[in-house]
Amino acid sequence: MPSSSSRSGLLLNLTITIFVLLGLYLAGGGAWLAALGGSWFYLLSGIVLLITAIMLLKRWREALWVYAALVFATLIWSVAEAGFDFWALAPRGDVILPLGLLLLLPFVSRELLPASPANCVPLAVGIVAGLAVYGYALTQDPQDLAGTLPTVAQQGPAVTPGDVAEAPAADWPAYGRTQFGNRYSPLTQITPANVKDLKVAWVFRTHDLKTPNDPGEITDEVTPIKIRDTLYLCSPHQILFALDAATGKEKWKYDPKLKYNPSFQHMTCRGVSYAEAHEGDVTADGSPVPTECSRRVFLPTNDGRLIALDAETGEACRGFGTEGTVDLTDGMPMRELGFYEPTSPPVVTSKVVIVSGAVTDNYSTHEPSGVTRAYDLYSGRLVWAFDAGNPNPNELPSDTHHYVPNSPNSWITSAYDAKLNLIYIPTGVATPDIWGGHRSADQERYASGILALNGDTGEKVWFYQTVHHDLWDMDIPSQPSLVDIRQKDGTVVPALYAPAKTGNIFVLDRRNGHLIVPAPETPVPQGAAPGDHLAATQPFSELTFRPKKNLTDADMWGGTMLDQMVCRIMFKRMRYEGPFTPPSLQGTLVFPGNLGMFEWGGLAVDPVRQVAFANPIAIPFVSTLIPRGPGNPAQPGLVSGGPSGSETGVQPQYGTPYGVDLHAFLSPLGIPCKQPGWGYVAGIDLKTNKIMWMHRNGTVRDSSPLPLPFKVGIPSLGGPLTTGGGVAFLTSTADYYIRAYDVTTGKQLWQDRLPAGGQSTPMTYEANGRQFVVTADGGHGSFGTKLGDYIVAYALPDASAKQ
């Protein structure tokens, strides 16, 4: 059995080895980082670790003093770079401080000569100082913005929402509850005082799960609608379910027998739309409304169909299109399966159903058109079209004309103002997204902005462009919110709020498209890849969540000092000059990233209080252009297979000079290289257009190796809802929770564990006197959350509901 002295010697030698290895790693990587113009601290730390190792080998007590100096230097450097933000400080000290504790252990400190407890004092003081700094930082959050949103009384006379007549208070009859897209319910049964009492009322299982023939991005993003006593919702393979709103029991279901394969970029259904005939209604051509299917549900399918079903029975409305179905590939320049995918609910007016769709991103310059079309509600006859890439966008298809390939599309639900009879379409960019040297002036004209069309004719009324010559896929990703805002002089302005991927929220007068909140044109980085060009300026709204400053290598993060250094090296090797840095062969850091600061969930707006609840995110991406050559042919016919079934990774962009590699900017450990937070909740006063509060949201419980509920603020895919009771609800984070918040302060009031990822937008309604909150929890393939098939309803116990 080895003696205690020999064991101490072995442990000391092991410690020396650790110091040598870490010292070489940090010195080598630190030298590379310093040569790139980054921080010198990693190089200096590596040198000190090597000096300490040599002194330990010689048993010199000064090793402890030298290392104590490194501990103090690390604390000073860390606070200088990161302030007292605990999660930013963590990787700067999580190697240095534990190594200091290691040196204080007896098997090291007693081996150093001349031996004396006094040798440990400087290092012990340094460790205590480090613990004090980190302990203090745990009590601080420099990223937190505390504040309050005004109440109705503080805002002055209440505004009657312009869509108030569209929906009974107990119902949720459209994707955004009404076609104003506000995701607001006037119900008040659930309040900040009783929300803690919410319990699961019922659970419904769709049994629609991922199959081997699905793409990687299979998602359950549905927001159900509720009319009278029935919920209507669709599952990822577009199976439509009608459920009893009070019990969750299935009434009927309809399976469209979707045709699909792994090349699809999406497999999702965000919802369905509802239409009901009223006395005096006529069809688009002025004919009387048929008695068949007087209440109908419209189901878009990912294989390019629009189906009308009887809301009572689930039977096809035979008079609509061909036996209840309109083929949305009619008139397209290409009709291959999966290239045109309507994933979001259409807009319904009193005469027409208006549908847009997603087009496969970044595959080629010959893909379907992104045309928006209106069909007669009852016959399915094509009434009008708006083909944004056509010189005459209202031209209808004929024997001699197809829609224009790669016209800018709209992949999320539009908003509609029935009084103005205007539909507001959030537009994307002509694919391929990351290269624009080939685009025509017509393809650029209506890209990446808000397009207002007459609901009866499809004629343009106005257009506002939020990104010029978009090379970053920075489209308008969510349904705009329509809000009537009372001004200081008492007048009410019909406003439109359009959250963009850039983090800007563009606020427009929805009558004419004029800016309400200034968005000055601001110079942006130049230097496009050969063959492309750039806009000299971009509009930057003054209502924005975009970063206040450009990222630096000090903003890079990691699980440890070691991978943080790698992230800093990767950052310095890329091109980055702030927002709108152009794509490059070098590799460009895109921040806000391709997910955007806002995604398809949009805002939740309380139009009575004149406030909004938002869930912005902050994850950088990397965009690297790949020149044509071996393994990257110019035409799809030279390789087998179709699209990749994903929006990230290597994308071919056939027909352009470059493919592109798109991915999140992650460390070698697979965590974001940008320091947290990565996701927030925020409150906006719409009368002043100021952000009044913002807090980190979500934990790493379901995305870290250890299930620890550290609240760093994590990304979310989905949107919030808000209620007349002053409570907002949000799922959508990468951890599996539904959460409730006080709208006034943003304080989290309640949470409950979900059975799978909740990448959807919840909704609420009343049935049998109880207010229910319903969420779809089926996960998201490419977001990496747990897949499932759950629809979960929450309600207060009867006693709490009556309080």
Image (tube, helix red, strand yellow):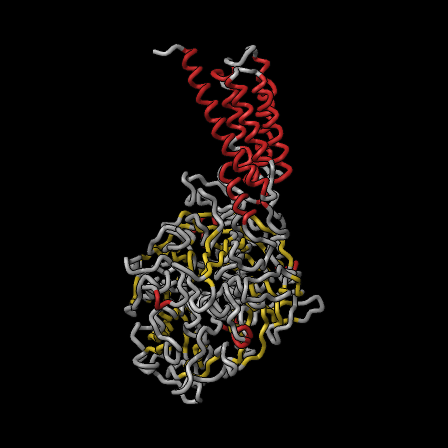
On the image, the x and y values in percent for residue 66 come to: 59, 23
Q: Residue furthest right?
A: 489
Residue 225: in sight, yes or no?
Answer: no
Corner quadrant of residue 500 = bottom right
Which corner quadrant holds the N terminus? top left
Q: Position of residue 414 (x, y in %)?
A: 49, 70
* Residue drawn at (44%, 51%) of the image: 738
Residue at 44% from the left image edge and 89% from the top image edge = 286
Q: Quadrant of residue 343?
A: bottom left
Nearest the eye: 768 or 264: 264
Up-down: is 621 above or below 164?
above
Depth order, front residue of 48/695: 48
- x, y percent for residue 239: 31, 66
Q: Position of residue 377 (x, y in %)?
A: 40, 80
Q: Is residue 202 visible?
A: yes
Residue nearer the viewer, 612 or 633: 633
On screen, residue 516 versus residue 430, left or right, reads right
Number of numbered markers: 0
Q: Nearer the viewer, residue 549 or 711?
A: 549
